[in-house]
Image (cartoon, rainbow, N blue to C red):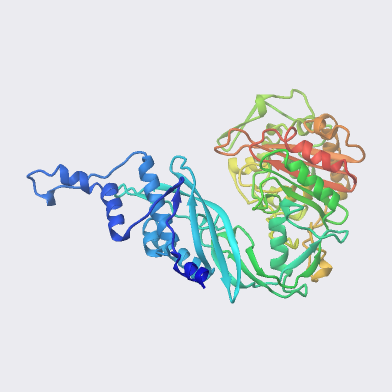
Amino acid sequence: MGNRRRVAERRKTRPAVLGGMIAVVVGGAGFGVYALYSGGAVADSRTETAASAADQKPKVKTGPLSAKEVTTAAETFLTAWQQGKVPQAAAATDDSAAAQALLTGYTKDAHIKDVTLTAGPRTGGKVPFSVKGTVSYQGTSKPLTYDSSLTVVRRAEDGKPLVDWHSAVVHPDLKDGDTLVTGESGTPPVKALDRDGNELTEKKYPSLGSVLDGLREKYGDKAGGKAGIELQVIRGTQSKKAELSDKTLVELSKGTPGTVRTTLSPALQAAAEQQVATRPKASVVVLRPSTGEILAVANSSHGFNTAFQGSLAPGSTMKVITSSLLMEKGLASPDKLHPCPKYFTYGGWKFQNDDKFEIKGGTFKASFARSCNTAFISQAGKLDNDSLTKQAQQVFGLSLNNWSVGVPTFDGSVPVQSQAQMAAELIGQGGVRMNPLNMASVSATVRTGTFKQPYLVAPTVDNRTLATASRTLSADTLAQLRELMSYTAAYGTAAEAMSGVTGDVGAKTGSAEVDGQKKPNGWFTAYRNDLAAAGVVQSGGHGGETAGPIVAALLKMGG
C-alpha cells in the first residue's frame, strides 16, 4: 500500500528538459517574464521620455535570434505541451490555430498520454528533442518513443521568437495536414511475399516501407485479413497529392494479416538495396521486359518512394523516346550525317552541349552515343508541339496516368509545350518528368518492341486491367533504336559502366540540370536480355559515373 500511495502522489507533469537543464514555467508569471524580454517592454519602460506614450511606436526587434531567445521559445513550447496546456503551447508557435488542432488531437484522437519531452543541444535556431509517452486505447497500452525537432523564428510584425509550426514538429512522419489517430485500423494488415513465397519486411529490405504501406492500403480489405488496433498517420490533402499512404506507428493489438504475393525477386531486391546504399539519394528499378514484372525497387533515402513516385527531369535518357520520333519521321537515321554544333538557338534559348563539344561530320549514331544535345534541338522546328507527347503516350505508354501497378506510382509526364520549352523536352528537360520505373519501362519497351505496363502484383489477384499502348514502332525503326542503344553501351557514354555486361544489351545515360543544384541528377537506363533497369542519383553528376554502375551491377545478375 505504501508503494501505491507514493505512486499516486508522484507529480503527473514534469517540466521539459532543455540541454540538460530543467525549465519550469510557473503559471502566468513565468510567461510574463518571457513576454517582457521578448517584446521589448522593459526597454521601453527604461527609456520613456516626456513625450506621450501614445505617440511612441514600440521598436520591433530584428536580426538573428540569440541563444537565449531560441532556448526560451523552445522551453515555453515544450513545457506547455508536456503539461497538457495546449493553448499556451500553440500560442508559442507562429500558427496557433494549426498547432492547437494537432496538439489537441495528439491527446484526444491519438490517445497519447504521460508525455515527456527532452530537448537536446541547440544548433542555430533548431532544437532537437526526444519524445516518450504511452499510447493507451480501450485497456491496451504501448510505449511510444521517437525523436523530433523544432525551429525558432522571429515573427516579422513584432520580432517575437516563436516555433516555426509544421506538423512534423509533433512527429517527423507527419506532413502538414496529416493527423494522428489511434483506433481500429481502417484496413487489415497484409503479409507481403516475394515471388518465391518469402515474407517481405522493412527490416530486411529498408526500401520497401512505403511499398508495404501501399500494398496494405490497396489489398488490406481484399486479402482476407482482420484489422487490429493501431496508432496511425492519417494522410491529409497534401500527402494524398503526393500519393503517400497512411502509416502505422504503433501496433497495440495485432490484426490478422491477409497474404499478397508480389513479383519481387529476393536476390535482385537484396542486391538493389546494397547498390543504392553506396550513394546518397539513389533510386533504381529492375523489370522483366517480356512480362512487365517488377523484380526490384530500392531507394537510399527511405520514406518517399522516388523510384516509383518521383517526378524528375530525366535528362538525356529521354533521347531514347525522342530518337524513335525523329527516325519515324525520317529526320534521323543511325548512319546518316547529322549536325552536332556547339550551340543551337531555338525559341530564344541558346542550347549547348556538355563542355561545349561539337561533332564535325558525324552521324546520328555518334550524336546519340555521345549525347549531343544540339543534334536533337536542331530538329525542333520540324516537329509539332505535341509530337513528343504523342510518341511517349502512343508507343511507350507514358503520361496517361493509367498505370495500375498494385501500389501508388507516378506514370511520367510529357506535357505539350511550345518554342524553347518544347525543344528542351526533346533532351529531357523543360516540362518532362519521369522516375526510374518509367525509364526502366522505356528500355523494356525497346527490348521487346511492345509496351507492357510494369506491375508489382499480378492483375489476376484483383482482376484489374493493365494499361496498354495504342501502337508499336515499325520493325525498321525499332531495329535502328536498338542499334543506337547497343552502340552507346559498347562505345558511347555508357560503355564504362556496361563493361562486362554481356548478351543482348543497350543503354543510355543522362544528366539533368536542376535549379539550385551544383551537380546535375545522374540517370542511366539499360537492358540486358530479359532484364531492364533504370536508376537516378540526385545531385550525383554524370549518369554514366553515378547511376550507371548501380544499374549495370543488377543487369549482370541475370536476364
Residue 466, by quadrant, is bottom right
- Residue 403 visible to the viewer: yes
User: Vertically, is 238 above or below 425?
Assistant: below
- Picture quarter containing residue 521? top right
Q: Position of residue 227 (x, y in %)?
A: 69, 74
* Closer-to-camera residue (549/115): 115
Work out whether residue 269 or residue 474 is closer to the camera in this orientation and state it: 269
* Residue 315: % across, % down: 68, 40
Residue for point 73% across, 64% down:
215
View extreme (top): residue: 360
Q: How many marks?
A: 0
The residue at the point 85 percent across, 41 percent down is 482
Residue 282 higher or lower than 496, as above or below = below
Using the image as rendered, state which of residue 167 and residue 124 is in the foreground. Answer: 124
Q: Position of residue 310 (x, y in %)?
A: 66, 50
Where 437 falls versus 368 (above or below)? below
Residue 449 in sight here = no
Q: Residue furthest right?
A: 503
Residue 268's spot in the image, x, y percent?
Answer: 83, 48
In the displayed structure, does residue 329 sit left or right of residue 490? Answer: left
Residue at the limit of the structure toward the left, as seen here: 50
Q: Name the one closer to the observer, 381 or 86.
A: 86
